[in-house]
């Protein structure tokens, strides 16, 4: 599939991102959060200012930080298209430190 980039495509992505009925968190190659949609902010209980620039591990239970950091590095060294956490039970941490179970889409 060929992807093009123009103002209409950018507006379509922005609309999808802002109004998606699932949380979307985008990170850079070193795991720093670069964008978070409103649904994810609501689910996790943070503001965008609290998350942008933080490592993605802020949203992951502490006991998984080291392992997740390595998964992230490995992915960026050899990226392959795959479903996140396929076949795994995924958990996240809200700002309140409550556990949030995730479903992979």
Image: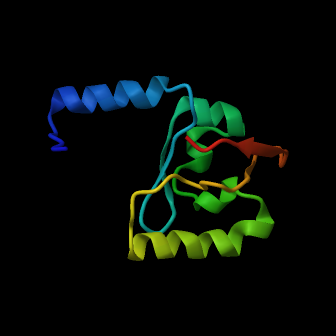
- Residue 88 position within the rendered picture, expressed as x and y whole percent measured from the top left: 69, 56
Please state if 31 lies on the left or on the right of 87 as rendered.
left
Closer to us: 70 or 48: 70
Residue 103 in view in this figure:
yes
Tell me where residue 8 appears, x and y as whole percent: 19, 26
Q: Is residue 65 above or below residue 22?
A: below
Task: Kindly tell me whether residue 95 is visible in this rendering.
Answer: no
Q: Choose top left, top right, bottom left or bottom right for residue 104.
A: top right
Q: Residue at x 49, y 26 (%)?
A: 20
Compare residues 90 and 29 and report the one nearer the observer: 90
**Residue 95 image point, x, y percent:** 76, 45
19 displayed left or right of 63: left
Q: List the single residue furthest toward the front.
A: 87
Which quadrant of the view contains residue 49? top right
Residue found 73% across the figure and 53% down from its top: 89
Q: Is residue 98 above or below residue 63?
A: above
Location of the C terminus by quadrant is top right
Residue occupying image coordinates x 63% and y 68% = 68
Location of the N terminus by quadrant is top left
9 left or right of 68?
A: left
Q: Nearer the viewer, residue 4 or 55?
A: 4
Q: Is residue 11 above or below residue 62?
A: above
- Residue 59: x and y, percent? 68, 53
Q: Residue at x 51, y 35 (%)?
A: 37
């Amino acid at each position: 599939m060929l992807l093009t980039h123009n103002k209409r495509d950018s507006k379509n992505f922005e609309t999808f991102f802002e109004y998606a009925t699932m949380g979307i968190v985008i990170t850079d190659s070193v795991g720093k959060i670069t964008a978070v949609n409103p649904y994810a902010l609501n689910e996790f209980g943070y503001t965008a200012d609290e998350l942008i620039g933080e490592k993605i591990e802020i949203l992951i239970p502490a006991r998984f930080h080291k392992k997740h950091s390595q998964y992230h590095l490995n992915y960026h060294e050899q990226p392959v298209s795959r479903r996140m956490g396929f076949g795994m039970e995924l958990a996240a941490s809200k700002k309140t430190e409550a556990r949030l179970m995730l479903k992979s889409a």
